[in-house]
Image (tube, helix red, strand yellow):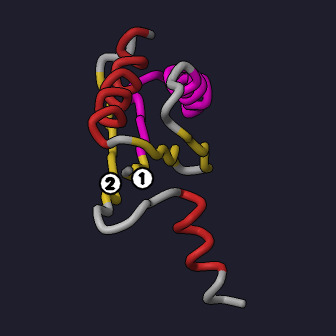
Amino acid sequence: MAVVEVSIVPVGTGDTSLSAYVARCLEVLKDEKHIRYQLTPMGTIIEGDLDVLLAVIRRMHEVPFGRGVTRVVTTIRIDDRRDKELTMAGKVAAVEEKIK
């Protein structure tokens, strides 16, 4: 299981607000049964099988193009741990237990 942070930014929309594009990208995630996700102020964190996540990110990347945007910048950070299960909640819990 991998934890991936993705940020999809349409460029040249003529507006400084991007929330409508973010909302449409999140609709792609809502249809995925084996992916957990968490929207953050600066991106979206998703967890699941890496091959599945990359395919979903590709579909999310295409969303702004489908809405008439001609340039999209997508940033992806991947945490892929193979020695034990990796989850969003587990990563947060590991830090929180060290600050108590």
> In the picture provided, is 20 more to the left or to the right than 51?
right
The segment highlighted magenta reads 6-30
Q: Residue 22 carries which label?
A: none
Residue named by callout 1: 3
Instruction: Say whether marks 1 and 2 touch (CB < 8 Å).
Output: yes
Mark before the other along the chain sequence, 1 or 2 = 1
Query: Residue 76 location, x and y as percent?
Result: 33, 47
**Amino acid type indicated by mark 1:** Val
Q: Quadrant of residue 75?
A: top left
**Amino acid type indicated by mark 2:** Ile
Query: Residue 18 location, x and y as percent?
Result: 55, 31
Asked whether residue 26 is drawn in magenta, I would say yes
User: Is 11 or 67 nearer to us in this picture?
Assistant: 67
In what element is the residue under mark 2?
Answer: strand
> In the picture provided, is 62 more to the left or to the right than 43?
left
Q: How would you rate the neighbour count of disc 1 (Cα within 10 Å): few for under 14, some for 14-19, many for 20 or more?
A: many
In what element is the residue under mark 1?
Answer: strand
